[in-house]
Amino acid sequence: MSKKTREIIGIILLGVVLTVIIIGRNNVVNAYEDVKLAEAKVQTMLQRRSDLIPNLVTTVKAYADHEETVFTEIAESRAKLANSINNSSMSEMAEADAELSQALGKLLVLVESYPELKASEQFTNLQYEIAGSENRINIARIAYNEAVMRYNKYIKTAPGILYAKLFEYEEMRYFEADPRSVSVPVVNFD
């Protein structure tokens, strides 16, 4: 084989290797960005619910203004969640979300003591909006965990593991609910 032929074969092999590396890196980046997009959707839905809470609290306060500890707890939990949405990891955001859910649970238990509040059209509409937000949050969490699963599977299996190690991509954590969120108070709106 001539020197010229070996050079051509070497250039072709180098081109193939570089193409494989570029494609593999792009696959890791795409999977990583899918996770980041799903995380942003969770943040958006948490923010949507957080934005509804002041209206809910204002409505309940009109009927139960002497229940200040519940309102304070909600305000503090909401502030913690708002701060975590853009400044924290998913696990810290999940913890802040669980605290807010606990505070909202207490608010809904409080509502049981005020039949005229339960009959309020404004309160009913806000309940529906928050329930819709909860559903959207749940869907966004599921989508996030599915994106994390795809990403983690890719970087743990061949050939993705090579690219993940080469370009220093690490396993991502799933959105896990805070254990306290399992014990949400049961509220009956009948």
Image (tube, rainbow, N blue to C red):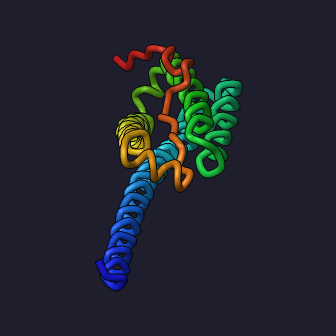
**How many numbered discs?**
0
Q: Residue furthest front?
A: 1
Q: Is residue 82 left or right of residue 37?
A: right
| Rendered location of residue 165, percent (x, y) | 52, 48
Work out whether residue 171 or residue 184 is closer to the camera in this orientation and state it.
171
| Rendered location of residue 47, percent (x, y) | 52, 48
> Taking the image as drawn, is residue 140 in sight?
yes
Up the image or down, 104 lies above or below 12; here it is above
Seen at 46% across and 53% down, the residue is 163
Seen at 51% across and 40% down, the residue is 171
Quarter of the image with the C terminus is: top left
Q: Is residue 5 left or right of residue 81?
A: left
| Rendered location of residue 46, percent (x, y) | 50, 43
> Taking the image as drawn, is residue 125 in sight?
no
Up the image or down, 127 lies above or below 51; here it is above
Work out whether residue 186 or residue 88 is closer to the camera in this orientation and state it.
88
Q: Residue furthest bottom?
A: 4
Seen at 39% across and 35% down, the residue is 138
Quarter of the image with the N terminus is: bottom left
Q: Is residue 169 left or right of residue 31?
A: right
Give the quadrant of residue 158: top left
Seen at 37% across and 74% down, the residue is 10
Work out whether residue 35 or residue 11 is closer to the camera in this orientation and state it.
11
Give the quadrant of residue 103: top right
Work out whether residue 64 or residue 133 is closer to the camera in this orientation and state it.
133
Up the image or down, 95 lies above or below 114; here it is below
| Rendered location of residue 188, percent (x, y) | 39, 16
